[in-house]
Amino acid sequence: MDTSPPRPEILQAFNLSGKPIRISGGQGTCYQVGSAVLKPIENEEESNWIADLNAKLVNDAFSVPKYIRAEDGSWVVNGWVAYEFVEGKHKAGNYAEAIIISQEFHKALVGIPKPTFFEKRNNVWSVADRIAW
């Protein structure tokens, strides 16, 4: 996957300004621009599904980053998505809390049908998704 920063027209489409700063970790492809994160995507259908789902998820036990719509109302612009930057905090060894939060997340997903694109993907993440679903 290309690790080049997003072009200026991508920032403009999401109404963002500033210098993209690469975020360490993950696949090394995400950039922070102010209070937003820009990420290149591989599957537009999957990205739209996640953005729609995250927009609907509300729970006091957990939070998910909300995606940012482009000026034209879309979630994806030329292979990029934007979502709010959420500061994380690692809590080593806090397994009991992680289990409780995972259970709350699971409850929030009850009734959400498995998306059809799950069976079309073939990468390490898709294998994990199929096992978890």
Image (cartoon, rainbow, N blue to C red):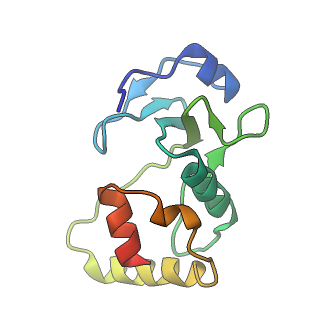
Of 95 and 45, the residue lying toward us: 45
Residue at 60 percent of width and 28 percent of height: 78
Horizontal arrangement in the rendering, residue 61 relative to residue 72 (left or right): left
Give residue 46's position: percent from left, percent from top.
55, 54
Quadrant housing residue 59: bottom right
Q: Can residue 108 be seen in this view?
A: yes
Give residue 80's position: percent from left, percent from top.
55, 34
In the figure, 46 relative to 41: above or below? below
Horizontal arrangement in the rendering, residue 129 relative to residue 116 (left or right): left
In the figure, 81 relative to 4: above or below? below
Residue projecting furthest to the front: 120
Of 111 and 105, the residue lying toward us: 111
| The N terminus, quarter of image | top left
Of 108 and 85, the residue lying toward us: 108
In the figure, 99 relative to 118: above or below? below
| Tally of numbered tags | 0
Quadrant housing residue 4: top left
Residue projecting furthest to the left: 93
Residue at 57 percent of width and 39 percent of height: 81
Residue projecting furthest to the top: 8
Q: Is residue 15 visible?
A: no
| The C terminus, quarter of image | bottom left
Horizontal arrangement in the rendering, residue 54 relative to residue 91 (left or right): right
Give residue 51's position: percent from left, percent from top.
62, 53
Residue at 61 percent of width and 23 percent of height: 11
Residue at 29 percent of width and 58 percent of height: 124
Horizontal arrangement in the rendering, residue 116 relative to residue 42 (left or right): right
Give residue 30's position: percent from left, percent from top.
41, 35
